[in-house]
Image (cartoon, rainbow, N blue to C red):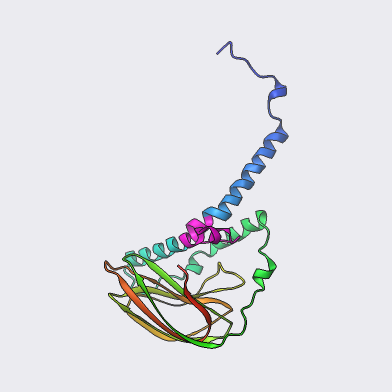
Amino acid sequence: MLNANIPPASELPSSAQLLRSTAIAAATAAVLLVTAVLPAEYGIDPTGVGRVLGLTQMGEIKVQLEEEAEADRLGNPAAGTPAGEQRSSLDAVGSFLAGLVVAPAAAQTLSATPPAQATQSDTMKVTLKPGEGVEVKATMAKDAALTYRWTTEGGPVNHDTHGEPTDDPNATHSYKKGRGVAGDDGVLKAAFTGKHGWFWRNRGSEPVTVTLTTSGAYSDLKRVK
């Protein structure tokens, strides 16, 4: 050890170089947090990159599973706390970090409004494997309404009727929730312009088929996950 060569001071990094390296590392970590960690773990996607990469859907499923597990642990047959309320603090953190390192979303996306919708009717069937979750949504303008009815064959499901506004796809508004339900019907009136529909999860040990019938002012009714 006594014979070790000590580098001269001229070869050591300067304070400015160390500060620059630290700043680059911090910025890189913040970008990864906003674009990968928050979408994949919490379903929070302030940049939209997570949804393109499929990470946001993964996070949303994780949050849904955690809510269901907590409700099961508490033995509460009613719906759990809406995801938007549980994640409000995380949303605030994500939005703050996004404002520091990411540019705002494109203006044309925020201002996009679907054209006037004609009345239509549809019937759709989806089959859920044990433990599987399925989501079906339609595009609706603000204050548009549709009547719906869905039933299950093979067992009950957990469900969440909700919507996501066009100008903020990361925000979720829940209209109705239920656990261990074999069917539901009613009128869904859009609280805002965006995607509106249903999420079902089969918590049983056998496949379950959900049959959905809709009629009203909407378009693009389709399975999204």
| Position of 62 relative to 213 (above/below) | above
| Position of 159 relative to 7 (above/below) | below
Q: Which residues are magenta?
A: 38-59
Q: Residue at x 47, y 68 (%)?
A: 83
Query: Residue 93's x, y, as percent?
Result: 58, 58
Query: Residue 160's x, y, as percent?
Result: 43, 74
Query: Residue 159's x, y, as percent?
Result: 39, 74
Q: Can you tell which quarter of the image residue 210 is in?
A: bottom left
| Front residue (pair 145, 17) | 145
Query: Residue 176's x, y, as percent?
Result: 44, 78
Q: Is residue 225 magenta?
A: no
Q: Is residue 23 visible?
A: yes
Q: Quadrant of the N terminus?
A: top right
Q: Quadrant of the C terminus?
A: bottom left
Is residue 217 shown left or right of residue 5? Answer: left
Is residue 16 shown left or right of residue 158? Answer: right
| Main secondary structure along the magenta-highlighted residues | helix
Q: Residue at x 70, y 34 (%)?
A: 17
Q: Can you tell which quarter of the image residue 117 is in?
A: bottom right
Q: Residue at x 37, y 64 (%)?
A: 70
Q: Is residue 174 visible?
A: no
